[in-house]
Amino acid sequence: FCLLGGMAAVADAGTPPMERAFETLARHGSLTSADLSRLDACGTALHRAVGQEWSSGLVLSGPVEPVAFFERALAAGHAQPALLAGLERLSVQFCDELRDAHLSALPPGLTELKLDACHGLTDAGVQTLSRVCGPSLTSLSFYWNNHLTDRAALQLSLRCSRLRHLSLSGCKGIGSTGILSLASRMRMLEHLDLTRLPLVDDVAVTAIAQASRQLASLRLYADSQLGDPPIIAVAKASGSALTLLDCTGLNKLTDAAIYALAEHCPRLSHLVLSWVLRLTDLSIAAVAARCPLQLLSLHGLRGVTTAALDALAQHRAYTLTALDVRGCTAMGSPTPTDLRARLPRLATFIIHT
């Protein structure tokens, strides 16, 4: 057990194999240049002790420490620090000073990478990381990276075909062309987040839904330009795998999309329909009867009445643990006490914030 300026690297001897027994968490304010040296030393010592590389996860956050980490790795050249050489999971968050050139220091065996809210990155950085570690990546997140465009998505499609988890949430410069390029080559996606992408259309999202036939979760939050086709497509293509769908703000959706979910998605447990204003009691009753819902948001659905609540009470009384019906004025504004009387397992009443 090593304490490094507020960080802990903990070995669990009962977790085989040995290289997966180490987890390093570095957070802004606790990782200094001295700590980096000590991490290197620990990595080297551990490598000698177990006789093999040890895998690690690293979280870097804030404007300073991520840059220091990458610049030190770049300065080391081929003599990479022990920590970097064994790194499998890396998360860098809210670092505006991170630049495309830093990404050339990424280790080639990286499997999970988050570069969230790193606003200094561009398409060139995505090209670099795709070349360096793209073939090994299975999980990639680019939350709120404003400078990325369709060219970034093209690079991912060419070199990151093993991705199972992809988040492009808030990457508003990526449009339909980029999503179509992903759809042309990615077949293994299981979790896809396309939140707040105003430039994507029904055709592109339908294409990637049809290409990724094992989607367990799909988030389309605030993509209000989308209509029924993508939802029907994912229901038919990934129906038996789909467990989570977020359609918040998709106010072009009609009951037809929800009927498709009810027909094809026997494992759908988390469904967010906040502000999907055209839906009626009929489609809510259908999905209640056919899907094992545990979480459901109907927040803001002014046309949904007590008939929908009756259907939920009839079919989901012992599966629903979270239900948001705030703003469902035609339902009579039931209180949590009212809802729990009919749905006794409810514990959460606010989903959409």
Image: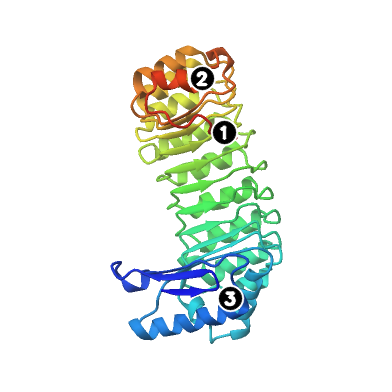
Q: Residue at x 41, y 31 (%)?
A: 321
Q: Where residue 200 sits: x, y (%)?
A: 63, 42
Residue on which disc 1 sits: 352
The residues bearing labels 1 and 3 have C-alpha atoms spaced at a distance of: 39 Å
Residue on which disc 2 sits: 335
Q: Where residue 177 sits: x, y (%)?
A: 63, 48
Find numbered disc 3 in the image and state the secondary structure of the residue it sits on. helix
**Which is more N-terminal, label 2 or label 1?**
2
Image mark for residue 269? none
Q: Where residue 128 sits: x, y (%)?
A: 61, 69
Quarter occupied by residue 236 = top left
Q: Give the answer, above or below, for where 4 lies relative to 329.
A: below
Q: Give the answer, above or below, for where 330 lies relative to 269.
A: above
Rate crowding at label 2 as few (under 14), some (14 to 19) or many (20 or more) other CA atoms within 10 Å. Answer: few
Q: Where residue 113 sits: x, y (%)?
A: 53, 62
Observer-side mark, 1 or 3, equals 1
Residue on which disc 3 sits: 105
Quarter occupied by residue 264 = top left
Q: Give the answer, above or below, for where 313 lies relative to 161.
A: above
Find numbered disc 2 in the image and state the secondary structure of the residue it sits on. loop
